[in-house]
Structure formats: structure tokens, C-alpha cells
Image (cartoon, grey):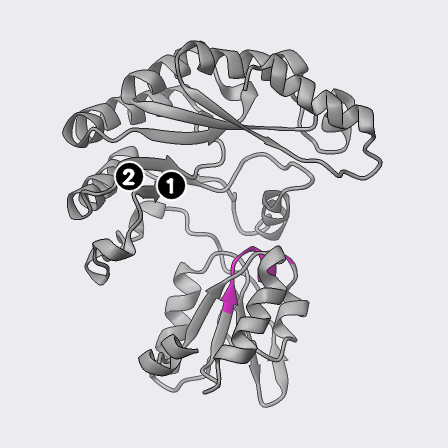
Amino acid sequence: KEKINNFEPDILLVGCRSLEASFTAKLLKSGNEKKIPVIIGGQHPTVSPERVINSEVVDFICVGEGEEAILELIEKLEKNEDETKINNIWAKKDGKIFRNPVRPLMKNLDELPFPDWNLFDARHVDTRGTFETSRGCPYSCTYCVNDYMQSLYGGVGGYHREKGISRTIEEMDQFLTNFPQVNDIWLIDETFTLKNDRVKDFCQQYKKRIKDKFNVPFGCMTRPEVLSEEKVRYLKEAGCKKIAMGIEIGNEKYRKEMLGRQMPQQSIINAFRLAKKAGIHTYSFNMVGFPNETRKDIFSTIDLNRKGEV
């Protein structure tokens, strides 16, 4: 409340996941005394737009990706133009809700500008830098928001897109030059090791421009079935310190039929052991509490982690 009252922003933009929704609403209800226009974006309004737009604390929601949509909304508000017909944006005005379709996805992510690092000083930046070399996921696991995004954008272009490796490395270089306290890089690509040549290219450029210059290691996420001994070697040489992979549940039949993850037990075990053998730390994603999950299933998940020596 104090931040909002002192800064007096023209608009409040809030990213929200589903488990944060009720807390977000409470914060806005108590903190936004001046009724500054609020736009909610992120996963929750994307998958549950009706629920979010009908909240008393919300004026706009952004469904799907927001770079172009938010810019257009801000420009309309600045010019006092009609803000109810912007693709990806749902708006409330004069007691009515205006529901707009999603716009085509950005095909060339390299057209996005680098973040404006001048807006921040070192106090605002953690010791970890987070970057993407690609966006979206080519897989459609039944429990994941990516399955919904694949469906949402099914008629306007493929959801998974890649950035140029050189462009990403240049962004990292500028970031680390501005914030020398950063000692770790995390890649948020959901399946970083999808393509062998791309992994090789990234690792060669990272070693030359980032590891050798700043001595900063990195970590990534991927899937066990797209990790190989060759890719692990590239990653290790470039300074990869950590790989995170999803196991989800140890029951292979359940994992394949209910979750849509076609991963044999042995491929999971082999992937984790490959990383461990190379001296790269591993982190596994697991879930407990699936519908009809048994005590035996839970212990099979624990056992699979042990076999993979996670």
C-alpha cells in the first residue's frame, strides 16, 4: 500500500499463477486504495480468464503472451483511445466485458529488445540471472500449462519457438557486465537439450563469451529422453553445473497413460546417471497426490529417484 501510494503508478501489472490467485486478490483489494487500473497476466488468467476478469479487483487481463498486447494497451491508455479491442486483452468497461481473441504468436523472438538494465541498480538484482534461448514446449503433457497453450495457439502458429544463440549470449554478456555480482545463470527453456546441434552451438559460444570471460556457471532444464552422452559432454565443457529433469511419478504405466510422458524407466535412470558421471548436479521434478495414486505408487517414485542416483 505504501509503495503504491508513494509511487503513484498509472497502471498495475501483476503476473499470477493459479495458486497465487486468492492472495493476489487480497493484496490488490487492500493495497490499491486509489483504484489504479489493474491488469493481470500470466498462467492463471490464461487458463481461467472468466474467473479472473470477473474479480472486483481486476480491470484487464492478458491471455497468452503479453509483450505486444501490453505495449498496445499502454499506448491506447496514454492516448485515451478505445482499449476494448486489443487481441490478447480482455477489458471491463461501463459494466461490460470485452473478450478479444489471441493474436498470432511472435515468430521471430530475436525482434524483442533486450531488457533495459538501466532501470535497475545492483540492489534490485539477485546473484542469479535467468534467460531463455527458446520459448514454449513441443510436448503436451496432460498436467502441464503447455498442453493448454498448444491448444490455445493451435490455430495461430506453433507454440515452441527458438531464439538465436548469438543473440542470447550477447544478452547474457551485457547483463553480466552491468551486474558483476551475478554468479549463476539459469536457463528457463523447458526442454533445453532438444536438438544436438543447438546444444553444441550454445555451449561453444557460452564457453567463449561467458565462462571464460566471467567464470559464471549455468544450469538448465530438460527431459530424460532427450539427454545423451554427447550433449552432457558439451554441457560439462561449457560450465553446466546443474540439470533439472521431470520424473513426476515412478509408475511407468500411469506416467505414460495418464500424464502423456512416454519415458521408459531405464531412460530416466540413464539420463540422471549420465549427468552424475559427468559431475553435473541433478534435480528431479516429482509430484505426489495424483488421482487414484496409491501408497505403492508413491514409493515407486522414491525408488526411481534412488535408482537414478538423483
> Under tag 2, what secondary structure?
helix
Relative horizontal placement of residue 7, taking residue 301 as reference (left or right): left
Q: Considering only order in the chain, which callout, 2 or 1, is on the residue closer to the N terminus? A: 1
Visible residue check, residue 155: yes
Tell me which residue sits at (35%, 42%) in the image.
Answer: 131
Measure how far apart labels 1 and 2 are at the Cα level. 7 Å
Which of these two is toward me, 281 or 136? 281
Q: Which residues are magenta?
A: 40-47
User: How many badges with numbers are in the image?
Assistant: 2
* Image height of 194 relative to 143, above or below: above
Residue at image x 17%, y 25%?
212
> Do residues under tags 1 and 2 come within 8 Å of each other at their CB atoms?
yes
Question: Would you name the residue on which mark 1 appears?
Answer: 132
Is residue 46 part of the magenta span, yes or no?
yes
- Residue type for callout 2: Thr
The amino acid type of the residue labelled 1 equals Glu
What numbered label is drawn on residue 168?
2
Asked which quadrant contains residue 127, the reply is top left
- Residue placed farthest to the front in the image? 2
- Point 84% across, 36% down: residue: 292
Can you say which quadrant of the picture contains the N terminus?
A: bottom left
